[in-house]
Image (spheres, rainbow, N blue to C red):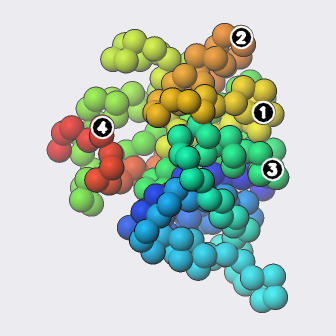
Amino acid sequence: MNDVTVIIRNKNEESWIGHSIQAVLEFLDSPEIIVVNNKSTDDSIEIVKSFKHDNLLKQNIRRYGDIKILKIDEYTPGKALNMAIKNASNKYILILSAHAVITKLDNQYLLNKFNDYDCIFGKQIPVLKGKKIKPRYIWSHFLDEEITNMYSSLEERYFLHNAFCFYKKLILEEIPFDEEIQGKEDRIWAKKLIEHKKNYLYTPKIECLHHYTNAGNTWKSK
């Protein structure tokens, strides 16, 4: 896919954001990358800038990208995402966690699936201190089979996860994220999509490693 804008929300993600961007550049052809920065005080933005393509220099596209950095002062997940979507130039959007590293991606497969779906999210493998951990709690949703409009019996609602999720930009313009809530904006959005009689897909054919951070609240088991 060569028509993708990648959106990464960042607050003090210096440990992993470079790994995340490097994987994006390896798996996607000339992506636009938008980083929405939420008052970071570490070196994460300097790391992001080190990947920024300089038009005056002849650079390897697998090492440098078209990167925009946006600032947000009154942060909510939905507000940050909607801001980035308004600034996105491409047909498809990938929302990616700053501590998620893509390990498997089939671009042609995604393009084919977008004929039937407006949103596609992939398998996430939880990693704690370099070790893959048993996929309990929310991680138990990331199965080895494709599921249309995944419903979570654990949460008792539709399940979608924005750490590694592709969208058609048009559907995000039609159905924006809720800007008032402080979390789970992806699950709320999934319900709205179903209400619009549209469909989304979970597939293990695309995959990422999701690394633990101190801000995470879903890492309940080693």
Q: Which of the labelled discs sits on residue 197, or is there none?
A: 2
- Crowd tier of the residue under label 3, counting other residues whose Cα lies within 10 Å: few below 14, some 14–19, many 20 or above: some
Question: Which is more N-terminal, label 2 or label 3?
Answer: 3
Q: Residue at x 59, y 79 (%)?
A: 50
Marks 3 & 2, CB-CB < 8 Å contact: no
Mark 4 element type: loop
- Of marks 2 and 4, which one's residue comes earlier in the chain? 2
Query: What's the residue type where badge 2 is placed?
Result: Lys
The mark total stands at: 4
Most foreground residue, 90 or 71: 71
Nearest the viewer among 103 and 151 is: 151
**What is the distance, in whole Å, between disc 2 and disc 1 at their CAs?**
16 Å
Q: Secondary structure at mark 1?
A: helix
Query: Which mark is in front, 3 or 1?
Result: 1
Location of mark 3 (residue) = 90
Left-right relation of 12 to 62: left
Considering the image in quadrants, where does the C terminus appear? top left
Mark 2 nearby-residue class (10 Å; few <14, some 14–19, many ≥20): few
Give the label on residue 67, or none.
none
Mark 2 vs mark 1: in front = 1
Element class at badge 3: loop
The answer for how far apart the CA atoms under marks 2 and 4 are is 30 Å
Q: CA distance from mark 1 to mark 4?
A: 29 Å
The quarter of the displayed image where residue 36 is located: bottom right
Residue at image point 69% right, 46% down? 83
The residue type indicated by label 3 comes to Asn
Please tell me whether residue 150 is drawn above or below residue 122 in the rendered image.
above
Label 3 and label 1: CA atoms lie apart by 12 Å
Q: Which residue is mark 4?
A: 218
Disc 1 target residue = 173
